[in-house]
Amino acid sequence: MPSPGSCPGFIPPYILHRLIDHGSDWQRSRALNTLTHVRQLLPNPGKPGQASAAPVTGALQRNVYDAGHLTVLPGDLVRAEGQRASGDAAVDEAYDALGATHDFFWQVYGRDSIDNRGFALTGTVHYGEGYDNAFWNGAQMVFGDGDGEVFQRFTRSLDVVAHELTHGIIESEAGLVYRNQSGALNESISDVFGVLTRQYALKHTAEQADWLIGADLLTDKVHGKGLRSMSHPGTAYDDPVLGKDPQPAHMRDFVVTQDDNGGVHLNSGIPNRAFYLAATALGGAAWEQAGQVWYDALCDKQLDNDADFQGFATLTVAHARERFGATQAKAVEKAWAGVGVSPG
């Protein structure tokens, strides 16, 4: 079972601050409530990785609860594994997205849930009132309904659900410390497998994919395509309330800050673009080669829990060479060089 660590949620603190400073009264109140909760979740100190060596079966076990707009977890059980659709969109979206994420990791990488031991997937919907976030708390997924003006309900986005569940996998495998470059890697790897889960469900190749994270979250009032762009970090949105997407795409623009645990949601744009460059260079379905390489690196016992970009990049090149050959390794190395990271 994963440890009781947590990550502070999908929506970065800098976006919540923008809503507090520039949003409507309702947006400000919801963002302030959400930010207060995010601060309670920070920081996650990380932990040493745990081996996952038990026999695997791939059996899926889901339970979805309804918090009834309160903040007590897990809430009331409303749909268990195998039960028919509830008619509540958030409940059924959560149920389907948990299943799609489980199936992706099992079918593509042979991974049996978060801990590779069949860990039951639990989600709670309707958390809080107008709660502008979704998060993994070390034991389960939690989804807010959004404020309805900037953010829609968080269960709408498969990549967001998969992103947060990947935090649980990272916690189980590598325990990447949620601060500075290791924290940005934590966020980036979650983005990688979030977007790959969506691409797999849609059967999109690397060339067909839009490479956006959170594209289904924004209301039509927001000037933006999503919350993050992996292909072109810093271009996802440019909005009077949210401001301009601040993610860097290259090490020359690396953000040094004490906020957001050392800019984990900002600097994740750098390894995000490296993955995009690797996936498009390798071609085809991104989960087959680039995704496999990133997954192998994540599960490598040599990955330190305080790894920096260079350390992780070095492992990806090594695994690309070991699994696929010199040509693929060169493509991965070139992708990292394209964002200013030189694998050792």
Image: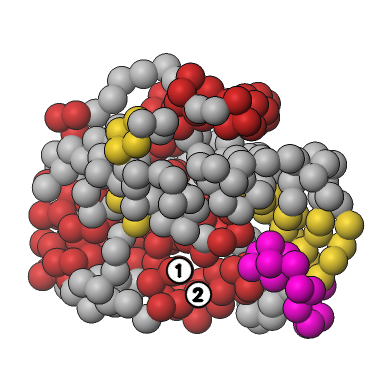
Magenta segment includes 227: no
Q: Amino acid at mark 1?
A: Thr
Of residues 279 and 153, the one nearer the viewer is 153
Of residues 338 and 40, the one nearer the viewer is 40
Q: Amino acid at mark 2?
A: Phe
Image height of 35 relative to 105, above or below: above
Of residues 193 and 216, the one nearer the viewer is 216
Residues in magenta, as a range: 80-94
Q: What residue is at 61 percent from the left and 59 percent from the top?
A: 155
Q: What residue is at 81 percent from the left and 59 percent from the top?
A: 65
Expressed as whole percent of the image width and height from the top left, the position of residue 63 reads 78, 66
Q: Secondary structure at mark 2?
A: helix
Magenta segment includes 90: yes
Is residue 216 in view? yes
Q: Looking at the rendered structure, which numbered label has been put on residue 104?
A: 2
Is residue 2 in view? no
Question: In the visual, does 273 lie left or right of 185?
Answer: left
Expressed as whole percent of the image width and height from the top left, the position of residue 48 reads 56, 41
Alpha-carbon span between mark 2 and mark 1: 6 Å
Question: In the visual, does 309 lie left or right of 195?
Answer: left
Quarter holding residue 270: top left
Q: What residue is at 61 percent from the left and 53 percent from the top?
A: 153
**Going from the N terminus, do you reach mark 2 or mark 1 first?**
2
- Which quarter of the rendering shows the N terminus? bottom right
Q: Secondary structure at mark 1?
A: helix
Q: Are marks 2 and 1 in contact (CB under 8 Å)?
A: yes
Quarter holding residue 207: bottom left
Q: Looking at the rendered structure, which numbered label has been put on residue 326?
A: none
Of residues 103 and 29, the one nearer the viewer is 29
Q: Kindly identify which residue carries mark 1.
A: 197
Q: What residue is at 34 percent from the left and 52 percent from the top?
A: 225
At label 2, counting other C-alpha atoms closer than 10 Å, the crowd grade (few under 14, some 14-19, many 20 or more) is: many
